[in-house]
Amino acid sequence: MKKLIFIFYVLLFSFFAKADEGMWLPQLLDALNEKRMKSLGMKMDASDIYNVNKGSLKDAIVSFGGFCTGEVISDQGLVLTNHHCGFDAIQNHSTLDHNFIRDGFWAKSNAEELPNAGLFVTFIVRIEDVTDAVLKNVNNSLAENMRQSLVDKNAKQRLNEVKKKLTRAPLSGLF
């Protein structure tokens, strides 16, 4: 009987459930999502979140160590990230007497901060939609292995084109 009641409630509430999620591309927020976000209570403009040419919240999001994301939360460079992202660094500072994994660590001043050699953050400068370039000459008439080969070739070519223009910044392909 309990199973039947449970199933009834699941079915009843599933009629009211509505998915409102997915990947919102930063450069398309103003065109696709700003009106919806404002109806949900957002007070800022989409350009305050992401603006390719001006300062915006995108400038506070960093790649942490090249393997995680983080957020800059102070004008002195304090960065927050998830525990698992800094686990190795925390573990390297731990000893039997000072187990930072178990007990945590709080630096009360910059002088008490523990350095993490080799750990870095990278700031996002620009996000660009390269779908058209990567899918150039790709069509459904090609065999799947040929499609993938062409996509890989186009992606590599696009990365090389952009790398030629760079003077001092790393480039990551996210496709």
Image (cartoon, rainbow, N blue to C red):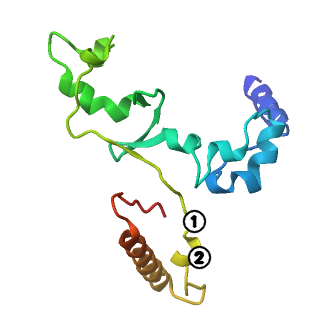
Look at the numbered discs 2 and 1 and tell me whether their residues touch, using CB distance below 8 Å: yes
Residue under numbered circle 2 = 132
Mark-to-mark CA distance, 2 and 1: 8 Å
For disc 2, the neighbor class at 10 Å (few under 14, some 14 to 19, many from 20) is few
Q: Quadrant of residue 114?
A: top left
Q: Amino acid at mark 2?
A: Asp
Q: Amino acid at mark 1?
A: Asp
Secondary structure of the residue carrying numbered label 2? helix
For disc 1, the neighbor class at 10 Å (few under 14, some 14 to 19, many from 20) is few
Judge whether residue 21 can be spotted in this image: no
From the top left corner, tell me how far across and down residue 44 is, in percent: 73, 37
From the top left corner, tell me how far across and down residue 26 is, in percent: 62, 51
From the top left corner, tell me how far across and down residue 146 is, in percent: 46, 86
Number of numbered markers = 2
6 left or right of 132? right
Q: Is residue 153 above or below residue 9?
A: below
Residue appearing at x 63%, y 56% in the figure: 27
Q: Closer to the camera, 157 or 86?
A: 157
Judge whether residue 3 can be spotted in this image: yes
147 left or right of 63? right
Residue appearing at x 19%, y 12% in the figure: 98
**Labelled disc at residue 129:** 1
79 left or right of 94? right
Secondary structure of the residue carrying numbered label 1? loop
